[in-house]
Amino acid sequence: MSRGLIGYAAKDDVTIDCDKSLMWPIKNNLILSFFVGAICVFGFAPFGFFPVPIAALATLFILFQRAHNPHVAAWIGFTFGLGLFSAGISWVYVALHDYGEMQMLLALSATLLFCAFLALFNALVGYIQAIFPVSTRLRTLLVMPAIWVLVEWVRGTIFTGFPWLTLGYAQSDSPLAGYAPLFGVYGVSLLVAASAGLIAYSYNFRSFRISMLMLVALWGAGIALRAVNWTHPIGEPFSVALLQGNIPQHLKFDENALVGTLESYRRLVLESEARLIVLPETAFPLLRREVPQHLVEQLRDHARRNGGDVLVGSFDHDMDGYYNSVFTLGSADEQKYRKHHLVPFGEFIPIRPLLGWFVNGVLNIPMGDLARGGQMQPPLQVAGQQVAPDICYEDVFGEEVIRHLPKASVLLNMTNDAWYGETHAAEQHNQISQMRALETGRMMLRATNTGVTSIIGPDGKVMQKLPQHQQSVLLGMAQGYSGSTPYVRWGNSGAMVLIVVMLAYAWTRRTSFR
């Protein structure tokens, strides 16, 4: 066997046809990895072709097998990630240029640099799997899938985390979603990567029948798990009205448009007879104390006549700073929730003494330096429910959402994705909310400025949603749920244990053969 063609392979890998790699120069492998990374995006919303990421990752694993050395494998991983993030989060440019008023070339450069930074995590996958001292069989079946998901978790944690495009999210409507209540999105990602590993294994080891049997077992178990009800309804269903104001982002903080914004939401609230009425994130672009008292009284009185409550997105202030917050009006005493997980460079400036002057000089983002709310805030007791709110992309972090559980009966996301224009960001965000519903066995209500406003069932399926970019109200019925899924009890530790077991077993089979 040629060490140069396969990397660190063991003697039992003689069934690999080493000549295959001679047909694929490194340049072609890099081009192919970028391409399959880019098409991986078609697995996510709004496209929803969930087998695509599995096929793309299987291709990447095959390219890892062909890598001459760990450095080549790292470059293959990097180009895959560059394709994935360039195609999947290009909407960052819209936020920076169209609404943040950053110069075009600077915004384009910043977007590309951000994508390249995220792609470094994929490069790390390529390098680590290549130096793991096991046979190519074990590397493909165990090491590649485990390292892939471990690095996804690191990306979703380090520097406040950016877990967007974690591959498990693409499976929100697939049979693999059945594993979400057990192991969360990273567990689903692990099943995606394991499926890709089986496909890559069958490609090079001519083990199609065994691989397909294992795939059928994995996916069949997912189908069976989707039929399990981990939580149960409590109380009676209640009516909800989720308001989509469709206030253009360039007018949202315009003082000349403020009266029109408040009037639009006042009208939409007064036209709604639901027990729970929810406005989007910062629907009132004012501090709570600045909201006109006559408007507060109108909304409170209307909510009480409905026997429920109104939830309003606004800002809040105390001696520690300003907060992105929610306050309640209605039958229950007024309560508030303050956003805890802030967006870097959008809601706070990392390393402010070093970067503050630059960020403030090139970006125009109102309320761009906020304080964090408390980490353990109680659910809002409104409309006879214990509602667990999160604001904007806080719902991307499943391990934080479950802090409210099992006490909370309903999940709520209030967001403003108008920052990203008419891109796929809002649909991707809604798909993330589907995963949170699956993980917790709770309904998820989403009130957004421009979309996607939706009602998601505890099985992760979208029950109702509004068309984007139009002013409307989503009227529907919701149900509170009680109980705990395994994920609520374990969090991400379940998936991490599986990863440790896979890597530990592979390590016990390590070889000194080079």
Image: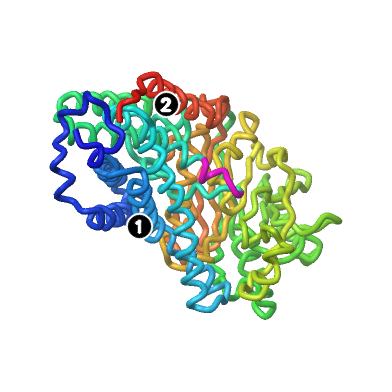
Q: Position of residue 68 (x, y in %)?
A: 27, 44
Q: Which residues are magenta?
A: 154-159
- Front-lying residue, 471 or 203: 203
Q: How many discs appear?
A: 2
Q: Residue 114, image x and y in percent?
A: 49, 60
Foreground residue, 459 or 488? Answer: 488
Quadrant into which the N terminus falls: top left
At a point 53% along the width and 32% down the height, the residue shown is 492
How dense is the environment of label 1, judged by Cα within 10 Å: few (below 14), some, or many (20 and up)?
Answer: many
Q: Nearer the viewer, mark 1 or mark 2?
A: 2
Confirm whether the magenta stretch covers residue 328.
Answer: no
State the residue lying farthest toward the bottom. 256
Identified at 14% across, 30% down, the residue is: 206
Q: What amino acid is at disc 2? A: Leu
Residue picked out by circle 2: 503
Name the quarter where the C terminus is drawn. top left
| Mark pair 1, 2: CA separation | 27 Å
Q: Which residue is mark 1?
A: 83
Residue 284 visible within the image: yes
Q: Residue at the spot x=66%, y=75% of the render? A: 361
Category of crowding for the residue at label 2, using alpha-carbon neighbours closer than 10 angstroms: few (below 14), some (14–19), many (at least 20):
many
Q: Secondary structure at mark 1?
A: helix
Q: Nearer the viewer, residue 191 or 377?
A: 191
